[in-house]
Image: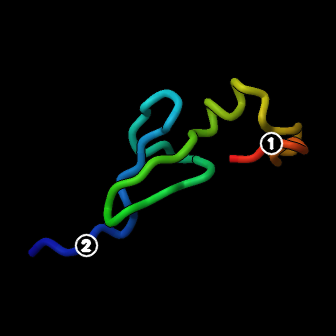
Amino acid sequence: MSGPLALPRLSCRKCGKANPPVYLAPVTTEAEGSCICLDCAKARQWLDSDGNLRPGIEL
């Protein structure tokens, strides 16, 4: 028996990583979607030392 997925399948909008364990800004339609993985957010210096978005950053 196949039912709906508990979580949508996500891919990072920046690097394409599939279903990252930690992500920001998910956008979903049905069972598919996109997000920004934590690694990409860190690489772009979008997060402060506490892991919060820096002022002026909008995702």
The image quarter containing residue 30 is bottom left
Residues at circles 2 and 1 in contact by the CB criterion of under 8 Å:
no
Q: Amino acid at mark 2?
A: Pro
**SS at mark 1?**
loop
Name the image quarter holding the N terminus: bottom left
38 lies above or below 58: above
User: What's the mark number on residue 4?
Assistant: 2
Viewer-side residue, 11 vs 5: 11
User: What's the mark number on residue 44?
Assistant: none
Q: Amino acid at mark 1?
A: Ile
Coordinates of residue 48 in the picture (x, y in percent): 87, 38
User: What's the mark number on residue 57?
Assistant: 1
From the viewer's perspective, tell me whether residue 58 is left or right of residue 14: right
Which residue is located at x 72 percent, y 26 percent?
44
Coordinates of residue 18 in the picture (x, y in percent): 39, 39
Viewer-side residue, 31 vs 56: 56
Which mark sits nearer the N-terminus, 2 or 1?
2
Which residue is located at x 52 percent, y 47 percent?
35
